[in-house]
Image: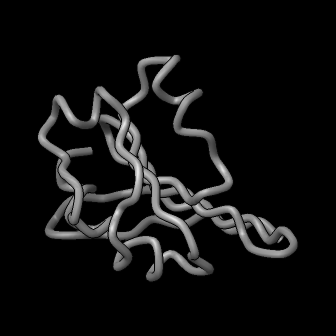
């Protein structure tokens, strides 16, 4: 199953995508400048393409990806101020 939705965080809208895969789902949250992705997606590719991206792992829901700390940050996301220790929700403020 593929689920596409919109969430509102602090007055900003973000698109969410959840794809049921085994053994875990693929989850992505897209902002205007970049995106928050689960561990299925490749940060090295995001960096190579110049994408503004952050990643977290061990998630099964959109709530999980918002509340877990980010584990990887693209160079472009760092330039915007994203830092280690932020949750996905906090990082989205920059994306």
- The answer to which quarter of the image holds residue 12 is bottom left
Left or right: 44 with respect to 69?
right
The one nearer the camera, 31 or 91, is: 91
Residue name at image x 42 percent, y 19 percent: 50
Residue name at image x 60 percent, y 57 percent: 39
Give the vertical position of 77 relative to 47 (above or below).
below
Left or right: 26 with respect to 95?
right
Quadrant in the picture for the C terminus: top left
- The answer to which quarter of the image holds residue 60 is bottom right
x and y percentages locating residue 18 in the rendered image: 65, 66
Residue name at image x 44 percent, y 82 percent: 63
Looking at this view, name the residue that lies furthest to the right: 22
Residue name at image x 29 percent, y 27 percent: 76
x and y percentages locating residue 21 in the rendered image: 84, 68
x and y percentages locating residue 59 in the rendered image: 57, 76
Left or right: 92 with respect to 25?
left
x and y percentages locating residue 10 in the rendered image: 14, 69
Quadrant in the picture for the N terminus: bottom right
């Amino acid at each position: 199953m593929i689920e596409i939705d919109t969430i509102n965080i602090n007055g900003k809208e973000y698109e969410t995508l959840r794809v049921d895969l085994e053994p875990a789902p693929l989850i992505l949250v897209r902002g205007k400048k970049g995106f928050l992705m689960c561990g299925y997606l490749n940060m090295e590719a995001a960096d190579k393409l110049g994408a503004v991206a952050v990643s977290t792992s061990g998630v099964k829901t959109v709530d999980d990806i918002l509340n877990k700390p980010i584990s990887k940050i693209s160079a472009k996301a760092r330039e915007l101020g994203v830092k280690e220790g932020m949750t996905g929700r906090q990082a989205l403020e920059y994306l």
